[in-house]
Image (tube, rainbow, N blue to C red):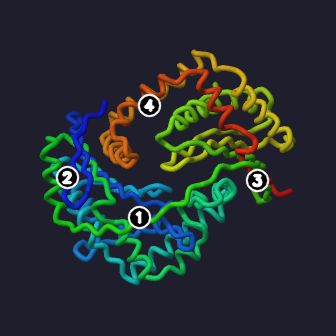
Amino acid sequence: MITYKNHTLVNGLTVVVNRDRSSKLAAVNLLYKVGARNENPSRTGFAHLFEHLMFRGTHEVPDFDTPVQMAAGENNAFTNNDYTDFYMTLPKDNVETALWLESDRMTGLDISEENLAIEKRVVIEEYKQRYLNQPYGDMQMLLRALAYRVHPYRWATIGLAPEHIAEASLEEVRAFYHRYYHPSNAILSISADIEEERMIDLAEKWFAQIEDSPRPAVEIPQEPSQTEARRQEIERDVPATAITKAYHMGSRTSSDFFLGDLTTDLLAGGESSRLYQHLVKEQKLFANVNAYVSGELDPGLFVLTGQLLPGTTVDEAEEAMQREIDRLQTEKAEPQELEKIKNKFEANTLFGEINVMNKAMNLGFYQMLGDLPLINREVEIYRSHTPEQVVEFCRRTLRPENCSTLIYRARK
C-alpha cells in the first residue's frame, strides 16, 4: 500500500507526494504527458530528442549535471510512446536542489542552434547504432508499421526516420517545447521522509510562479479494428530467423491489460512456462521465446515472439505457436498455474514498493493514467481474474484476422 496526497497548483501542475519514513533519500519525478503518440507524422522523434535536450542546460543553469552531483544526487530520463519521464534521487535534505533544477528547465531551456545541433547528432547516431546497425534492430519498427495503420503507435519512440530529426528547424523544436513542456501538462511526484504538506509547500515554492501556456489539444487518430490477417516477410543478416505475432487488445486501464498480462506469464513467465517447456525444451523448435503486452495508454498489442533453431521451418514454428494458442482458447488453466503467476505479481509489486524511486515514478504514472487509486488495487484485480476469463480473453483477442505476423528471416 502506497499512501499519498495529491494537489493541483493554480497553474495546473499536478503534485503527488508520499512520505517514506524508511528512506534517507528523496526521489523527485517529473512526468510530461508527451510521447511519440503526440508527434506529427512528418516530424517524429521529437519527444525523444527532448529527453536529450533537457540535459543541455538552461539560461540560468548552463550545466544541469554539476548541481546534481554537488547535491550527491543521480538523475536520468526515458521516453516512450505515451510520456517522457525525468527522475532524480538525492539526500532528502537536498530535495530543493531537484525542485529548483526541474522548475528551471520547465521554462528556461536553452534551445540554441548549437545545443540543437549537438543533440541532433547524438540522436541520429543512436538511431543508426541501435536500430539500423544492430541485429534485429528494426524488428520492432517493422512490427509497429505492420500492426498499426493510422495511430501514431505505428512508429517507435526513436521516430520513423533520422531525417525527421536532421531536417527539424529551430522554430519547430521550440514550438514543440512550448506546446508540451508546461505546468498543466506535467505531473510532479515526490517520495521522501518529509511531511507531506511540506513537500506540497515546496512544490508551490518552486513551481507556482511558472505561468502555464496550454495549447489546443491535438486529436490523436484511433486505430480501427483489424479485420484481416496481415503478414510481412523480410531478410536480414541475423543469426536466426525470428517470428513475431501481434494481436490488438485493450488499453493499460482496461481488463484486457490484466488478462493479457496473466496470459503472457502463462506462456513465457520463466522456464516453467508453456512456450519454454513445449517449444524450446520438448519440441526443440525455438532457441528462445517470449510473450508480452505493450501496456500503452491507448489500445495496445499482445505479442508472441521467438527465434527458430537451425532446421526448424517457419511453417513448423507457426503451427507450434498456433497449437499453444488453441490450447489457451479451449482449455482452462489449472488454478495452481494461475495462482503461481498471481503470487509472483504480488511479490514483485510489494518488492517494488520498497524502493523510493519506484514509488515516485509509479505515483506519476498512475496519475497520468487518470486512475491514481489503481496503484493500490492492481494486486486485487489480478487475484480476481479466473481461468474462464483468461479463455474468453484468448478467444476474443488471439484471432487470425486480428493478427499481424512478421517473419524476420536470416539471410542464407
**Of the residues under marks 3 and 2, which one precedes in the sequence?**
2
Type of the residue with mark 1:
Ala
**Of the residues under marks 4 and 1, which one precedes in the sequence?**
1
The C terminus lies in quadrant: bottom right
Assess disc 2: are there few (<14), some (14-19) or many (≥20) residues with their C-alpha within 10 Å of its C-alpha.
Answer: many
**Nearest to the observer: residue 378 or residue 88:** 378
- Could you tell me if residue 73 is visible in this image? yes
Assess disc 4: are there few (<14), some (14-19) or many (≥20) residues with their C-alpha within 10 Å of its C-alpha.
Answer: few
Tell me the residue that label 4 is attached to.
348
Tell me the residue that label 3 is attached to.
408
Give the CA distance from mark 2 to mark 4: 28 Å
Tell me the residue that label 1 is attached to.
217
Assess disc 3: are there few (<14), some (14-19) or many (≥20) residues with their C-alpha within 10 Å of its C-alpha.
Answer: many
Give the CA distance from mark 3 to mark 4: 33 Å
**Of the residues under marks 2 and 4, which one precedes in the sequence?**
2
Nearer the camera: disc 4 or disc 1 = 1
The N terminus lies in quadrant: top left
Q: Quadrant of residue 211?
A: bottom left
